[in-house]
């Protein structure tokens, strides 16, 4: 069964902190949009 959890909230409310801990506990990958966007910017391509 595929498991997806989405956390929504204002900036700096602890989403990242809690999701990293929960991902480790449940053995799930932790993906956040901020990291994805920063990775694209570093690639210096048109999408970034």
Image (tube, rainbow, N blue to C red):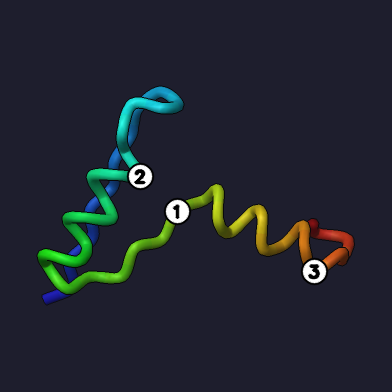
Spatial CA span between label 1 and label 2: 8 Å
Tell me which numbered mark, 2 or 3, is placed earlier along the sequence: 2
Image vertical order of residue 22 relative to residue 43, above or below: above
Give the mark nearer the N terminus: 1 vs 2.
Answer: 2
In the displayed structure, would residue 4 be above or below residue 9? Answer: below
Label 1 residue SS? loop
Q: Position of residue 10 (x, y in %)?
A: 40, 23
**Residue 24 figure quarter:** bottom left
**Depicted 13 relative to depicted 24: above or below:** above
Mark 2 residue element: helix
Position of residue 37 measured from the top left corner of the image (x, y, whole percent): 64, 53
Q: Name the residue under label 1.
A: 32
Q: Position of residue 47 (x, y in %)?
A: 80, 59
Q: Residue at x 33, y 26 (%)?
A: 13
Circle 2/circle 3 CB separation < 8 Å: no
Q: Residues within 10 Å of mark 2 (few under 14, many from 20)?
A: some
Q: Pointer 1: residues within 10 angstroms few (<14), some, or many (20+)?
A: some
């Amino acid at each position: 069964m595929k498991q997806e959890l989405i956390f929504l909230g204002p900036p700096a409310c602890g989403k990242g902190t809690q999701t990293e801990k929960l991902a480790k506990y449940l053995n799930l990958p932790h993906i956040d949009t901020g990291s994805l966007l920063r990775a694209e910017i570093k690639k210096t391509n048109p999408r970034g």
